[in-house]
Image (tube, grey):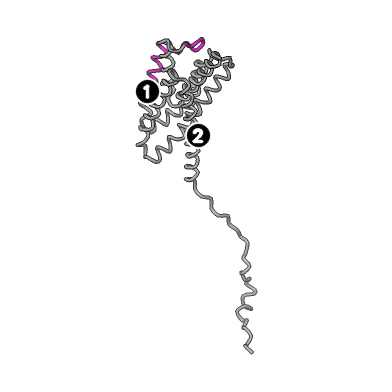
């Protein structure tokens, strides 16, 4: 029973971290790496490199650049394009690194699960941002970006200190993002130009041919009796 509860706890923590990576991969990686160095979690080989001080410094520098750039319209779209590839990789590392030691699940399955979760959040985030830009003329981008960073930080910390709550929060987040993605689809579908009505060249039943037109003009109704 203890082994089962430990596996569930690790999986829920991994789910929270991988979902947070879709919002901000660097915050999630830093949180897990620092937690490993502080002894709050134990990462096993080959994921213990994440606690190396030089690795953490590199992630922090790149994360700072991303943190600032994501608040600038146009730059944020370029960063999101790069994030389409980074977030799934980070999600895979976080999911497998956090849950691999406590479960008997094959590492490939864990990597695939983290890749899907992190990628799904990032792809939805990338799809939603153009709508924010279009509806707020770019003014809402920094606000949305700051909110994403706060949620990522909260969820990553929750995954370390309250794993079950983090897993539940991540599931709710995935449902909300799925709903938002559906709304985005309807938004762009509504903005698409309407299709013109089909044309028809069939003559109507009331048309008169040229050879019958004179006879029609000379025709007089009969005199009343």
Work out whether mark 2 precedes mark 1 in sequence or the reverse, and give the earlier one: 1
Residue 86 appears anywhere in the view: no
Q: Secondary structure at mark 1?
A: helix
Relative height, residue 10 to residue 139 (above, below): above
- Location of the C terminus by quadrant is bottom right
Q: CA distance from mark 2 to mark 1?
A: 28 Å
Find residue 147 and report its horizontal and vertical position in percent: 38, 30
Picture quadrant where residue 128 is located:
top left
Q: Residue at x 38, y 26 (%)?
A: 150
User: What residue is shown with label 1?
Assistant: 65
**Mark 1: few, some, or many residues within 10 Å (few <14, many ≥20)?**
few
User: Is 64 part of what is drawn in magenta?
Assistant: yes
Residue at the extreme bottom of the image, as rendered: 225
Find residue 100 and report its horizontal and vertical position in percent: 53, 14
Q: Which residues are magenta?
A: 42-65
**Mark 2: few, some, or many residues within 10 Å (few <14, many ≥20)?**
some
User: Is 208 part of what is drawn in magenta?
Assistant: no
Find residue 92 and report its horizontal and vertical position in percent: 51, 20
User: What residue is shown with label 2?
Assistant: 178
Front residue of this view, candidates 18 and 26: 18
């Amino acid at each position: 029973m203890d082994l089962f509860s430990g596996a569930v706890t690790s999986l829920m923590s991994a789910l929270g971290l991988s979902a947070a990576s879709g919002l901000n991969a660097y915050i999630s990686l830093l949180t897990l790496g620092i937690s490993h160095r502080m002894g709050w979690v134990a990462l096993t080989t080959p994921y213990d490199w994440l606690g190396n001080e030089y690795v953490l410094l590199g992630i922090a520098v790149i994360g700072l650049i991303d943190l600032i750039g994501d608040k600038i319209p146009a730059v944020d779209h370029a960063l999101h394009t790069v994030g389409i590839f980074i977030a799934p990789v980070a999600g895979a590392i976080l999911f497998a690194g956090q849950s691999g030691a406590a479960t008997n699940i094959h590492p490939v399955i864990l990597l695939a699960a983290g890749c899907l979760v992190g990628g799904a959040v990032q792809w939805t985030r990338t799809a939603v941002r153009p709508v924010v830009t279009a509806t707020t003329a770019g003014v809402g981008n920094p606000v949305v970006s700051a909110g994403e960073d706060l949620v990522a930080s909260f969820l990553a910390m929750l995954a370390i200190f309250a794993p079950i709550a983090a897993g539940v929060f991540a599931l709710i987040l995935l449902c909300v993002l799925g709903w938002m993605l559906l709304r985005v689809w309807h938004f762009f579908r509504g903005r698409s130009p309407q299709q013109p009505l089909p044309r028809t060249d069939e003559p109507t039943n009331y048309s008169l041919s040229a050879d019958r037109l004179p006879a029609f003009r000379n025709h007089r109704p009969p005199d009343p009796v």
